[in-house]
């Protein structure tokens, strides 16, 4: 018996070697982020910090690729038999993370959930003209609109229109603390304000993807610490927004920096129902005190592009900011407008902001100084990130500095943001002329005709100034040298972690 023991041990070790080798070769990417996710329910969330996780956990019917083109996601193909009917043919064999196959009923449920006012989904505006969303069979979904909506496909690419399983929503009440998607990664562990661990979805419908076995999000509020983490190798990657740190990283041979002009917009907006912001003259006066170039230089170290209501990188639609009203500071005119509105000595108000990048504290500080030049005192109401989101949702602010998710499609961004029924019209702005132009723009199908409407709309919005559009920041990812395969979209998405790998 003894003479067989050694060969048996060797045989056992040989059989175990593939498993040991696979374990040793496990590919984990650790990404540093400066703020925690505020919930994971894709149909509900608004914070970029949440969307970046949702990028990896869920899918939509279609998505936007790194060239800002609409490409298939859960829908393998689609057809548009007339200008109010869309038929989507779904991929077969797609599974939710709970093991159940995703079918057309799930798509109809999810999109109707977004449409339900009780859900309070930020994505509701994308489907506002839908009269019915139904499953024709197990793998076919039909959307019928009340009128043409050329931005529909772009809207369907939003994370807010991700597909979720009904049974999970009914069991949990919502999906803010769980994740039951179809995405390339699955939620394994979430330690709030510390880390979130995602693991590879073995049943992901894109063959061979994802390439990583695990993605770990680490919450590190200080941007300098994020950079130090990548440089030391403790982090593989970090989303870094502070221009000074990005400029430093670009000179560092130990890291790689990817930068791309963004399509998101930094804004300074008002609660248009609160005095004195219900007076257009006051809003215009503040607009005339704003110097975008100074804000970009001071808050972004030059890493941004001044913009009007549409990001300038969307060249098909955006008017040059310099061609719009109130594009340059004019302190004398601003003071006269304030005097005409009954505030010859200025007034005092609060700007809600947060110390995280999305909360825009550095931007608010520059604005505070600029407004002082026309006698207006802006007090900074600096709050914790979760409180910031809560104030945003409840419209509980005089004014607020934000990052707004932009789009290459003007209807998708402007309608939800500034139509009186818009899902994220947190400015509580209601204007008949703006509503009419927005309704016209989404009903037209020829881009030449739409262009005329959106050109006028950009001018009107700048004149009425319910919100001051400041600039589009650069999108920056700082990575270790072992990371490869990542692509930037331009809207902050990290979906392409599904094609990313790390070398050992």
Image: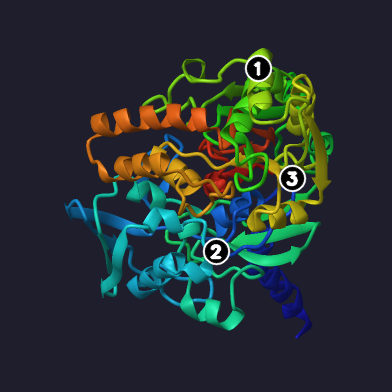
Within the image, what quadrant is residue 289 found in? top right
Is label 3 in contact with label 1 (beta carbons under 8 Å)?
A: no
On the image, numbered disc 3 is attached to which residue? 32
Q: Secondary structure at mark 1?
A: helix
The numbered dot on residue 293 is: 1
Give the distance between the C-alpha atoms of the residues marked 2 and 1, in whole angstroms.
45 Å
Relative to 386, does residue 203 appear above or below in the rendering?
below
Who is closer to the viewer here, 94 or 288?
A: 288
Give the distance between the C-alpha atoms of the residues marked 3 and 1, in whole angstroms.
29 Å
Could you tell me which residue is drawn at 74 percent across and 54 percent down? 36
Q: Is residue 149 left or right of residue 263?
A: left
Q: Residues within 10 Å of mark 1 (few under 14, many from 20)?
A: some
Is label 2 in contact with label 1 (beta carbons under 8 Å)?
A: no
Residue 381 placement (x, y as % from top left)? 81, 44
2 or 3: mark nearer the eye: 3
Residue 342 placement (x, y as % from top left)? 69, 31
Q: Is residue 56 left or right of residue 63?
A: right
The numbered dot on residue 407 is: none
Who is closer to the viewer here, 273 or 222?
A: 273
Q: Secondary structure at mark 2?
A: loop
On the image, numbered disc 2 is attached to which residue? 201
Relative to 380, does residue 390 appear above or below in the rendering?
below
Q: Earlier in the sequence, mark 2 or mark 3?
A: 3
């Amino acid at each position: 018996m003894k003479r067989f023991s050694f060969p048996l041990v060797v045989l056992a070790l040989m059989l175990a070697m593939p498993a040991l080798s696979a374990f040793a070769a496990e590919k984990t990417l650790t990404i540093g982020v400066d703020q925690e996710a505020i919930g994971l329910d894709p149909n509900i969330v608004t914070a970029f910090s949440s969307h970046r996780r949702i990028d990896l956990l869920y899918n939509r019917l279609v998505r936007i690729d790194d060239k800002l083109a609409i490409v298939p996601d859960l829908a393998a193909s689609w057809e548009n038999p007339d200008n109010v009917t869309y038929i989507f043919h779904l991929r077969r064999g797609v599974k939710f993370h709970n093991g159940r196959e995703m079918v057309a009923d799930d798509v109809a449920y999810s999109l109707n959930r977004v449409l339900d006012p009780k859900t309070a989904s930020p994505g509701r505006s994308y489907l506002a003209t839908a009269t019915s969303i139904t499953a024709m069979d197990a793998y076919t979904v039909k959307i019928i609109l009340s009128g043409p909506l050329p931005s529909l496909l772009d809207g369907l690419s939003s994370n807010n229109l991700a597909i979720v399983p009904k049974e999970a929503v009914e069991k949990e009440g919502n999906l803010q603390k769980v994740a039951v998607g179809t995405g390339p990664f699955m939620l394994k562990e979430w330690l709030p304000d510390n880390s979130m661990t995602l693991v590879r979805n073995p049943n992901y419908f894109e063959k061979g993807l994802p390439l990583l076995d695990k993605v770990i999000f680490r919450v590190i509020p200080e941007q300098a610490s994020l950079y130090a983490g990548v440089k030391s190798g403790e982090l593989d990657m970090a989303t870094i927004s502070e221009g000074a740190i990005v400029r430093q990283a670009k000179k560092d041979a130990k890291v790689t920096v990817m930068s791309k002009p963004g399509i998101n917009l930094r804004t300074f907006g008002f609660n248009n129902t609160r005095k004195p912001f219900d007076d257009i003259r006051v809003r215009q006066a503040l607009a005339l005190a704003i110097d975008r170039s100074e804000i970009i230089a001071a808050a972004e170290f030059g890493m941004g592009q001044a913009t009007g209501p549409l990001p300038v990188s969307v060249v098909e639609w955006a008017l040059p900011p310099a061609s719009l009203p109130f594009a340059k500071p004019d302190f004398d005119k601003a003071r006269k407008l304030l005097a005409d509105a009954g505030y010859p000595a200025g007034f005092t108000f609060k700007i809600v902001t947060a110390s995280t990048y999305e909360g825009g504290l550095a931007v608010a500080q520059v604005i505070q100084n600029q407004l002082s030049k026309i006698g207006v005192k802006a007090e900074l109401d600096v709050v914790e990130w979760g409180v910031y989101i809560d104030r945003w949702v409840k419209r509980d602010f005089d004014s607020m500095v934000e990052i707004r998710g932009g789009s290459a499609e003007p209807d998708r961004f402007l309608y939800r943001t500034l139509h009186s029924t818009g899902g994220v019209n947190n400015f509580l702005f209601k204007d008949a002329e703006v509503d009419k132009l927005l309704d016209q723009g989404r009903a037209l199908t020829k881009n030449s005709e739409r262009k005329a409407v959106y050109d006028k709309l950009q001018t009107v919005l700048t004149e009425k100034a319910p919100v001051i559009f400041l600039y589009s920041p650069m999108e920056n990812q700082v990575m270790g040298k072992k990371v490869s395969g990542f692509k930037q979209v331009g809207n902050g998405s990290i979906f392409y972690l599904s094609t990313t790998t790390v070398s050992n």
